[in-house]
Image (tube, rainbow, N blue to C red):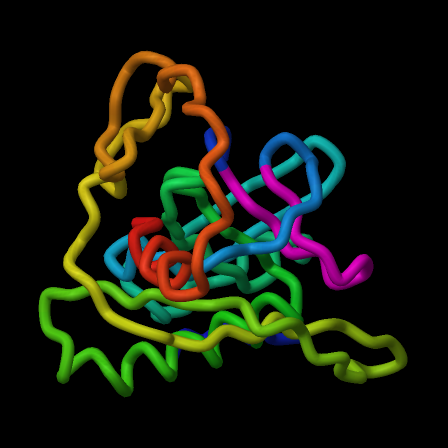
Amino acid sequence: MLNLSSSSGGGNYIRFMPSANAWLNSDKEEFTPKKMVVDTDSLQTGWMHLGEGVRDWQPDVSLGKKGSQPSPDHKRGFSIKFYNKEMGVAEWSANGTGPNKGLEQLWKEIESQQKANVGKYPVIEYKGSTLEKIGKGTTRIPNFEVVSWIERPAGMDAVDDGTQAFDSAGNVTTSAPAAPAPKAPPKSAMKAAVEDEEMF
């Protein structure tokens, strides 16, 4: 158990906003998540205080081992990293009920498949969100599905200093990508499906 229920950082990141039912990137732009690889080694649980200009993260000593609450403003939360070539490595962290429930559900699915996929990393797909009543209000729970397991992509180990780019094979380069090639004719459905699997 991740122990994310509450009891009475810089760099590339993504955020799920239940109130807007939307995902934002670190440029504050709305986007729709594509398939992403989950860096299962990066998951941390802990206490998080989020406020105007405030982000205080106190991770647990070990996953799901709930320590004492640092202050009334700290809520149970998590930090985990996702990756695809388009966004690079991005941290998703939150301390809200909806995101916490979404991560709990995803982690249960990942854990149920890990023994059959030792040494590999799950590829997930965002499946929209579910509206749920919480007390007198409502929240949205992001839903994910594990669609495959793959070897760790090289791009997951890159350090994003703002200058990295990815070549067509997903390898990190330090220079900007070359000028775009002339427009190719429309892709067949099969070719598009194959390229979709190469986004890592």
Majority secondary structure of the magenta segment?
strand
Residue furthest left as drawn: 119
* Quadrant, the N terminus: bottom left
Residue 187 placement (x, y as % from top left): 45, 52
- Residue 117 visible in image: yes
Residue 194 placement (x, y as % from top left): 32, 60
Q: Is residue 71 left or right of residue 17?
A: left
User: Considering depth in this image, is 7 or 176 the residue closer to the camera?
Assistant: 176
Q: Is residue 123 left or right of residue 31?
A: left
Q: Is residue 83 above or below residue 147?
A: above
User: Considering depth in this image, is 181 or 172 the residue closer to the camera?
Assistant: 181
Q: Is residue 1 above or below residue 95?
A: below
Q: Is residue 177 above or below residue 44?
A: above
- Residue 43 visible in image: no
Q: Is residue 2 left or right of residue 144?
A: left
Query: Which stretch is magenta?
Result: 13-25
Residue 45 placement (x, y as % from top left): 41, 61
Which residue lies at the image location 10% right of the left edge and 73% below the top edge? 118
Q: Which picture quadrant has residue 171? A: top left
Residue furthest front as drawn: 185
Which residue lies at the image location 18% right of the left edge and 53% below the top edge? 152
